Amino acid sequence: MNNLNYTIHKANKVQREYVLERVTIKNESERENAIIFVATNQDNDVIGRIVLLEQVLPLINGGKIWYISNVFVHQGYRRNGIATQLLNYTFTEANKLGIWSL
């Protein structure tokens, strides 16, 4: 089960729905705007995820901030640096999207 061949990328539509079924996001707008990155194994199974949510706060960064809502790695893949790689990937991709602070 613990094959360390994995990739990290933005979730596709199917992966996004899979993740959204497993996390609690009360606000529908937050669900729609969530940015989700996943780690997938050779079989394209989601073995890890990170979810970014946007929150509107007046007078801060134009009224919007992003925060990390959820980080998860499947039990059989933990202790292999996947969460660290998900975080590093997220920071890089967030900067490309103009998100400078998480």
Image: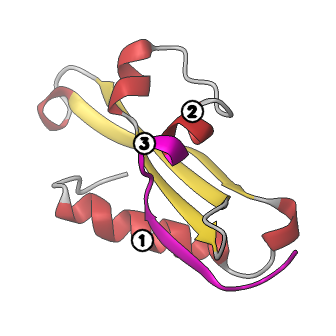
Q: Specify few, some or many for label 3: CA neighbours under 10 Å numbering under 14, 14-19, or 20 or more.
A: few
The spot of residue 22 in percent (x, y) is 68, 34
Q: How far apart are marks 1 and 3 (CA)?
A: 19 Å
Q: How many labels does the image show?
A: 3
Q: Which residue matches tag 3?
A: 13
Q: Which residue matches tag 1?
A: 89
Please give the name of the residue rendered at 54% of the width and 15% of the height, measured from the top-left corner: 26
Q: Tell which circle, 1 or 2, labels the residue nearer the N-terminal end.
A: 2
Please give the name of the residue rendered at 57% of the width and 32% of the height, measured from the top-left corner: 20
The spot of residue 49 in percent (x, y) is 59, 55
Q: In this view, does 38 lie to the left or right of 4?
A: left
Classify the position of the N terminus by image quarter: bottom right
Please give the name of the residue rendered at 80% of the width and 77% of the height, measured from the top-left corner: 79
Q: Which amino acid does label 2 sit on?
A: Leu
Foreground tag (1 vs 2) = 2
> Dividing the picture into quarters, in which one does residue 64 lie?
top left
Pick the residue in front: 55 or 24: 24
Q: Which residue matches tag 2?
A: 20
Q: Specify few, some or many for label 1: CA neighbours under 10 Å numbering under 14, 14-19, or 20 or more.
A: some
Q: What stretch of residues is rendered in magenta?
A: 1-15
Please give the name of the residue rendered at 53% of the width and 76% of the height, measured from the top-left corner: 7
Can you see residue 68? no
